[in-house]
Amino acid sequence: MNEVRPQLNELLFSAVEGVSVESVDVADAVVQVEARSTARRAVCPGCGRWSGRIHGSYLRFPRDLPTSGKFVVVSLRVRRFVCAESSCPRKTFAEQVPGLTRRFGGRTERLRFTLVSVGLVLAGRAGARMTGRLRGTGQPEHPAAADRLAAGSSHRDTPRGQRR
């Protein structure tokens, strides 16, 4: 398996640095990808200072583009860091993997970019039908969702308590 891991990293996350693929399991309609962040440090979003002191870790499950007609489930282990700045209001913060995740995002960046592109080109009901297939649900996305993504504001990208 150690010989296959570098190939899996290149295949699945070629444009993303700091991610290591631990395993890939293929079932009938689902590809399960287990990955972890490999960065040694992260920047605090509150004060901008680098920290290497790990507080803990947790799993994120961002949706990704389907592959070969199969729904892709990413289990990404990310870490929480302790901010090194004593005056920073954030005591801990979660690392983000540039090119793969963003704060409060439930989608990978490549799925988000694809949904925005489809929404801008097709728009309306045709775009909604296509994005439902891309998301792997078969259920159409609401036509206005692509507009929110293109504008950079999706209710899925904001904390639940701050949604309108």
Image (cartoon, grey):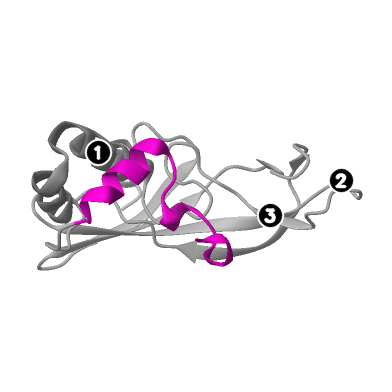
Q: Are marks 1 and 3 in contact (CB under 8 Å)?
A: no
| Quarter-of-image position of residue 57 | bottom right
Numbered tag placed on residue 114 in the rendering: 1
Question: Which circle's residue, 1 or 3, is located before the other in the chain?
Answer: 3
Question: Residue 115 at x, y = what percent?
Answer: 25, 42
| Quarter-of-image position of residue 63 | bottom left
Amino acid type, callout 1? Thr
CA distance separating discs 1 and 3: 28 Å
* Closer to viewer: mark 1 or mark 3: 1
Q: Is residue 134 left or right of residue 73?
A: left
Question: Residue 23 at x, y = what percent?
Answer: 33, 58
Identify the element where label 1 is drawn.
helix
Amino acid type, callout 2? Glu
* Residue with the mark numbered 2: 85
Question: Magenta segment: does it hold 86?
Answer: no
Let me know if residue 124 appears in the view: yes
Question: Which circle's residue, 1 or 2, is located before the other in the chain?
Answer: 2
| Quarter-of-image position of residue 99 | top left
Start-end of magenta stretch: 141-164
CA distance separating discs 1 and 2: 38 Å
Question: Magenta segment: does it hold 151?
Answer: yes
Note whether 112 is above or below 79 in the view shown.
above
* Residue drawn at the location 49% of the way across and 46% of the way down: 102
* Closer to viewer: mark 1 or mark 2: 1
* Residue with the mark numbered 3: 93
Give whichever of 85, 133 is nearer the camera.
Answer: 133
